[in-house]
Every structure is written in C-alpha cells, then in structure tokens.
Amino acid sequence: IEGESDSMLNRTEVANAIQAVLNKNYNLVSDPTATNKLDHNDNVDQDFTVMFSKLPDASYTSVPVDEAGNPIPGTTPTAETGEPGTPVKTPTVLGYTPSKTLPEVPTDNGDVKVVYSPDVQKGTVHFVDEAGGTLAPDIEVTGVTNGLIDHTKLSNQIQQIINHNYNLVSDDTAVVVFNNDDNDNQNFTISFSKLPDAGYTSVPVDEAGNPIPGTTPT
C-alpha cells in the first residue's frame, strides 16, 4: 500500500481482503489500517497487522431432496457442521447422485435442501403362467431409482398373450418401482392363467351354406 506521509491509508484493497476473510467464518478483532496513518520515514516500510478470530463452524440440517424438491423416500435429514459459505456436505444416498451445484453452509443453523438425481437402474421382465412356465421372451427394461417401469415396451406382449386365451393374473411392472441398488438387475414377473378351451358345435355345410346330407353336427 502506498500513500503520502501522515495520510490515512487507501483501504479499498484492504477492505476487499478483510471481507474475503470474514466470508470464511472469521471475526474481525482489530484493524490498524482504519485508524493509523502512514509515517514520514521514507526508508522503512510500515507493517500493519489486521487480526481475526476463527468463528465456530455453523450447524445445519442436510435434507436430501429430488429434483422436484421432494424428500427422497427412505432418507433421513442429518445434522452437519461446516464453514459458512463453503459447499455443504453430501451424505451418501443409495441410488442417487448429488447435484454438481451445491448450496452453501448457512449462517442461521437452518435446514438445507441438497438436490440428488436418481441413478439409472436396469431390470428384466418375465412372462410366465401359473406353473412358472415361460410364455414369451424376456424383455429388458431401464428406468431410474424409485421410478416406475415404462409400460410402452410391455403392452403389446401382454396383449398377445391374452389373445392366446390367457388371463392376466398379476403384473409387477404396474406397481413395483426400481430399487436403489445400482448393481442389481431387478426381476419383474407378469403372470397369466390359461383360460379353459371354449366349446362350440361344428356344422358341415356346402358352399351354399346348406347342411350336407348324411352329416351330423359335432
């Protein structure tokens, strides 16, 4: 810092530096640059020491939420401490990844919502009868943690099986969501029961639709 003899310091640069330290959770104890003047000794540079004391870390509660701001199922808010102005801690949430843009530790000891994105999950859908026999080839599906399966890929196959005289008994894919294990390929089962064959009477007729003489409906 330069200035004229017996003049007050130009504190613009000093003030910016002080604020940067305060932002790191420090308290200003003393600042001689605010009250002392430059001397008139041209041969010796003066030293000014600005003193700070470290404030205790702030306490806050980390609340894991999804991208819509809703609490993530199966998680519990956690008590954390940190330096105000620094990124908050990100507790591990299985099946989720914390946002790259994190909120900062607050100074008011409040709740902090930390946004997590659901990870990609995989699964295999099996089509079986009541005895566990396979009725159609498996279909591989993907989704996200705690998300439902997209039924678009499955509806045609379900209808084809129903068209072959089967009744839909249960469908995991309609009610079960993907779990939070990124290494687990989940199994989903859609079960059907075979309907009894339909009874009918066969009547032999000629090309005009008339019963053929000597024949009997069976």
Image (spheres, grey):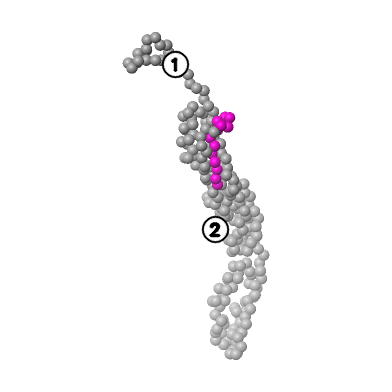
Name the magenta segment's main secondary structure.
strand
Magenta extent: 121-133
Mark 2 is on which residue type? Lys
User: From mark 2 to mark 1, how far is it between C-alphas?
Assistant: 71 Å
Which residue occupies the foreground of this view, 155 or 112?
155
Other-residue count near label 2 (Cα within 10 Å), few / some / many at <14 / 14–19 / ≥20: few
Other-residue count near label 1 (Cα within 10 Å), few / some / many at <14 / 14–19 / ≥20: few
User: Going 57% across and 44% down the picture, which residue do you hit?
Assistant: 185
Q: Secondary structure at mark 1?
A: loop
**Where is residue 173 shown, x and y percent of the image?**
54, 38
Asked if disc 2 and disc 1 are in contact, CB closer than 8 Å, the reply is no
Which residue occupies the foreground of this view, 212 or 119?
212
Horizontal side, residue 150 vs residue 181: left or right: left
Horizontal side, residue 58 vs residue 169: left or right: right
Residue 2 seen in render:
yes
User: Going 35% across and 13% down the picture, which residue do you hit?
Assistant: 210
Work out which residue is located at the far front of the displayed protein and give it: 214
Q: Quadrant of residue 43?
A: bottom right
Horizontal side, residue 111 vs residue 161: left or right: right
Which residue occupies the foreground of this view, 184 or 72?
184
What label does residue 166 carry, if any? none
Q: Secondary structure at mark 2?
A: loop
Q: Is residue 208 above or below residue 55?
A: above
Query: Where is mark 2, residue-wise?
Result: 100
Which residue occupies the foreground of this view, 172 or 37?
172
Residue 158 in magenta? no
**Where is residue 81 shown, x and y percent of the image?**
65, 60
Quadrant (top left/top right/bottom left/bottom right) for the C terminus: top left
Quadrant (top left/top right/bottom left/bottom right) for the N terminus: bottom right
Lower sequence index among marks 2 and 1: 2
What label does residue 201 carry, if any? 1
